[in-house]
Amino acid sequence: MKPLIAITIGDFNGIGPELALKSAASPVVRRISVPLLVGPLNVFEHVRKTLKIKLTLHKAVFPWRGTTATPVLDVGDGLWADIQYGAVTKAAGRNAGVAIEKAVELCVTGRAQAMVTSPVSKEALNLAGYNFPGQTEMVALLSRSQRVAMMLVSKHMRVGLVTIHTALKHAAESITKEKIVEKVSIVHEALTKNFRIEQPTVAVLALNPHAGEGGLIGKEEQEIIIPAVEEIRQKGIDAEGPFSADAFFGTGRYKRYDAIVAMYHDQGLIPLKMSSFGKAVNFSAGLNIIRTSPDHGTAYDIAGNGRADTSSMIEAIKLAVQFAANHD
């Protein structure tokens, strides 16, 4: 049987509903999975009709028996929707948050084999009372997962992060030996469990320019990162570093490793997105459930005009299906 993949609505003032609907209508997606949309049915219907997306929607009732229509887990009547394309609103955050809650519930209870989250506005989520730095942290808490590492995956590289949605001025002070060991361990486990790589190699990046120049430009490498890499290697993980990030990516050294662990968000994701923007996938490694998402945001500037590119969303669904198969 094809896996049931829960796809959340995201921010309805952005491209979330459009991405979800177009992806659910994609022959590639329908061939490998049963896409289950999660969000207000009438919002999905409104966007479907407005953008003339050829898709028949049907309110989902479990146990799902399967029809040619696309099931929708209706999280509410949508009366509070009030779509305002390009705006950050409490209503959009509320709908997005409830959809995430329900999708996690589907996965935790085994009704869905994986979830794929459409882009949300963190500001809108916070307006609605969901006080999380991002969806990764929210899904981790809701699924009662003790560990999580954000990874971005493309055909060129796999990048894990030590700190995620942290202000840059706080990132350095958030990096500890224990956190590096934890994140590298999670990434290594994902490489073996999810990607089925037998003996994965992991590169660990430095924090400071030129890897600190022996302590002249910062002591984090000597005091934190090098001891962390040594401990990781003692655990039997094939890890190397710390590498100066600019030379590591600039010389193509990243091609030698199955994954890279960066110290902060932009350090790892700028090179990945420069090489694969719109086709990479965000994967939450270490969760009790399978969760992926596209590598971009709400795209408020093009919301409602039918121009959203589904490439990354479809790749996210394909990766979720792959992981679900590997999980069996």
Image (cartoon, rainbow, N blue to C red):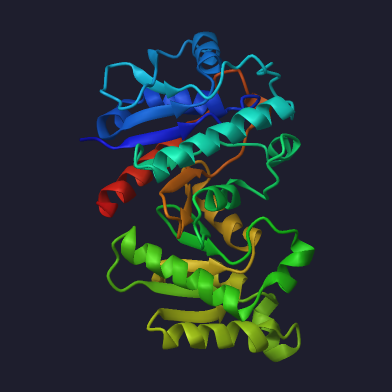
State whether residue 325 is above or below residue 219: above
**For residue 133, side relative to residue 326 (left or right):** right
Q: Is residue 239 left or right of residue 93?
A: left
Q: Is residue 69 above or below residue 221?
A: above
**Residue 306, horizontal then vertical, whole percent:** 55, 19
Image coordinates for residue 102, horizontal then vertical, percent: 50, 35
Q: How many labels sit on residues?
A: 0
Quarter assignment of residue 259: bottom left
Q: Residue furthest right?
A: 169
Q: Is residue 252 visible?
A: no
Q: Is residue 307 left or right of residue 58?
A: right
Q: From the viewer's perspective, is residue 287 above or below residue 163? A: above
Kindly indicate the quadrant of the structure image that contains residue 308.
Answer: top right
Relative vertical location of residue 151 with respect to residue 204 in this rendering, above or below: above
Q: Quadrant of residue 270?
A: bottom right
User: At x 55% / y 9%, what residue is drawn?
Assistant: 50
For image coordinates 25% across by 30% down, the residue present is 31
The x, y position of residue 80, in whole percent, is 67, 18
Q: For this rendering, which residue is in front, 102 or 162?
A: 102
Front residue of this view, candidates 241 and 225: 225
Out of 165 and 125, give the one closest to the viewer. Answer: 125
Query: For the point 41% across and 50% down, which residue is it?
Result: 289
Quadrant location, the N terminus: top left
Residue 110 showing in the rendered view? yes
Percent position (x, y) of residue 155?
40, 53
* 306 left or right of 213 in image: left
